[in-house]
Amino acid sequence: MSSSTPESPTMDPEYLKHGQSKPSFLQVSGTASQWSSLPKDLLITIEEEYLDLYTDKIRFRCVCSSWRSRLSKMPNHKNSRLPWLLIPHNHGITCGFMEPLEKRVHKLELPQSGEKVFKGSAYGWVVIAEKSSSIYLVNSLTKARIKLPPRSKFPDVRKYHANKHGKEYLLWSLSLISVPGEYYSVDSTGVRNDLLQKVVLSSSPTCSNFVAVAIYGELGSLAYYKRGDKKWSVLHDKAPPYKDAIFHDGQLYALKGNGQLMVCDIGSYPKPMVTEVAPEPSRTPFGDLHLVESSSGIMMVQQCFKRGYIYEPSELYIRKTTSFNIFRLDTNCRNWYQVQSLGDDVLFLGLNSSIAISSHDYPDTYKGNCIYFTDVNYNFDLEGTGRGFDEGVFCLDDNKIEPLPAYVGDSHKVWPAPIWVTPNPY
């Protein structure tokens, strides 16, 4: 199948080969038009009789959009929640997927040239921001691409001039970084890197009621986009900063820097209604905070660091994770309480929407009571220094951090930081 089709991933034959013990129907010669016109009954027969692994079924549907449209949507499967590690190279122009069950890396080229950074992922889609102000979603398997309103359409932007190099943005100030209540100029790289922290998704963007919510600006404010909107709208302009957000039971839950949890009704009229779910804990958390939806409810995860400087070959600010603290939400008392163990759960934290799975479903792959984490701090001064990212596996049983499973190739060429993705061909 031609890789020039917009929704067709770039793959070598190994990407689609099922296994050595069964015949491969995907190596038969033929033109692209012949491949895309295979009868529905034949496609169903191939999938049902010759593809056993869930990951193989995903790849089969990613060959081209015509195959995917002829096959029924796959039912929920425990492997559909299993995250893959998206490993970018050359500023995200090329990427690899570390598939944990097979322990292999699959190559993938993302559409559009230019330097990219990741700002979130969920439902198989990755949020990508570019220096040009563009923000868009890419399906990590099919390469389908959906535009979101650009960074220049956020509530804090008064003017945007793409050709005014070094001063592309004129932003409204809310903090002591500049004079509160006044405007100040920022270059496009600084806005992309530092003033757009994260984007979370309510569902796959192909759904009619799709909503995206961004944490942005100097203090971590909230803005939202509904399918069909031309700009980002203010969700809650009071009492930031917000550190993380998730969609749970159809509602947006947003976590403030002091640990206070809010629920946001984006559909309320005339403007979104924001109410408190739980106050800040008795011991105010510090460091990065993550919200996680698990089988046992909502959790707040505090990521603790040690910070410092290195001076060779040049002065660099670095930070490294030292530990995590776990808080669960008591929905009856509407309060947080700290716990010492995740039990059988495994967490995946990073710039992605946080993921929780049960180690019982993957006994040979993941150990329970562990946190797999990737870097959320874009320290661009580290690029080219040979120093790795702040990432690893934290085990709550012994409070130790081990390296993530090794990359294939030179890890020092990985840039920006990897991100967790749950593959989805839709």
Image (cartoon, grey):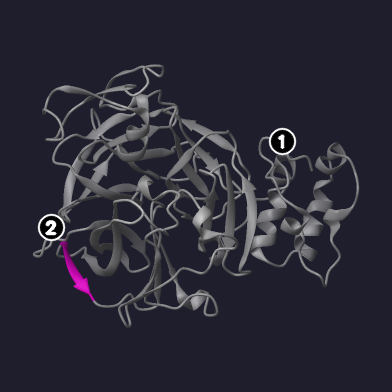
Q: Is residue 145 magenta?
A: no
Q: Which residue is at the far front?
A: 313
Image coordinates of residue 160 in percent, x first then y, are 34, 19
Three-letter residue code for mark 2: Glu
Q: Main secondary structure of the magenta part?
A: strand
Label located before the other in sequence (1 or 2): 1
Quarter of the image where one finds residue 325: bottom left
**Is 313 left or right of 243, judged from the image as shown?**
right
Residue 390 visible from this viewpoint: yes
Residue position for label 1: 5
Residue 421 visible from this viewpoint: no
How far is mark 1 from mark 2, CA to CA?
Answer: 50 Å
Q: Nearer the viewer, residue 373 or 179?
A: 179
Nearer the camera: disc 1 or disc 2: 1
Quarter of the image where one finds residue 386: bottom left
**Is 420 left or right of 169, judged from the image as shown?**
right
Q: Which residues are magenta?
A: 334-339
Res. 280 mark: 2
* Quadrant that contains the N terminus: top right
Q: Secondary structure at mark 2?
A: loop
